[in-house]
Amino acid sequence: MTTASPAKSAAITLAFFLLLPFLFQKTDYVFRQYAAVPGMLEARANQHYQWQHLFGLLEVVGWVATNFQQTVIRGIGAAVVLYLTWRTKRRTPSIGAGLTLYALATCYILLLGSATERNTYGMLAPFIGLMAAASWETRDGRRLALMSGLASIMLLSHTLARAFPHTLLATTKPLVCVILFCWVVWITIRPPATTSAPPITRLTPAA
């Protein structure tokens, strides 16, 4: 039995998600929404709002990036993520390839998306939760403290944003994402450990 190539699998997946809305809405409505996508993206790009992404964080600290600068940074970020993906494929990090790729893709979407909102950072919850559980299982106190601290900051982010609007404390979620991304980059590029087994595999109970 032959398996589908990665490109074919990606095309099938993309087609599935593009056709999915037709199951729940009228055909003409879906076509109108797809046709309006370029205009909606342009309107969002020029809308002045404190988006919870990297550029919103940079604006708070004093640097407002132009549209061209944002495009360049997004391109550089995409190249970095692609390199780290290639490196992960060649040498699996200690937390496993699947979790590493999920974290890299999620951080890129959240930090460099055009209109990231605060609630979108719920995408980080599965990764942080699994890392915290794995750290508890392997008695990795430093990693458990890191994940617990990041989760606590995210839980307090709404309260901080209401108490200190238009300050750095109002952008705690993108700041957490930057810290998490830097940590994932570090474990991806560092030399592999010689004695420790991948932590996630230890969560599987013995037969």
Image (cartoon, rainbow, N blue to C red):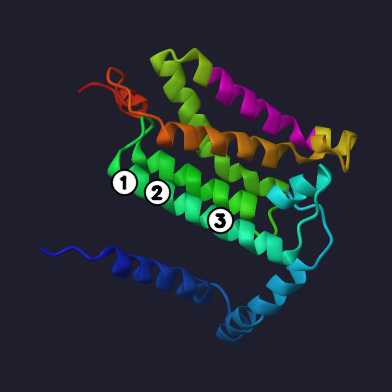
Q: Answer left or right for 176 relative to 143.
A: right
Which quadrant of the structure image shows residue 33?
bottom right
Whether residue 147 appears in magenta in the rendering, the answer is yes
Residue type at tag 2: Thr
Q: Secondary structure at mark 3?
A: helix
Disc nearer the start of the sequence (3/1): 3
**Gap in angstroms between the C-alphas marked 3 and 1:** 20 Å
Q: Residues within 10 Å of mark 3 (few under 14, many from 20)?
A: few
Residue 139 lies, in percent from the top left, at 43, 12
Q: Which residue is mark 1?
A: 89
Q: Which residue is mark 3?
A: 76
Q: Nearer the viewer, mark 3 or mark 2?
A: 3
Residue type at tag 3: Ile
Q: Looking at the rendering, in which quadrant would you find the C terminus?
A: top left
Q: Secondary structure at mark 1?
A: helix
Q: Foreground: 102 or 111?
A: 111
Q: Which residues are magenta?
A: 144-159
Residue 25 lies, in percent from the top left, at 58, 76
Q: Foreground: 112 or 41?
A: 112
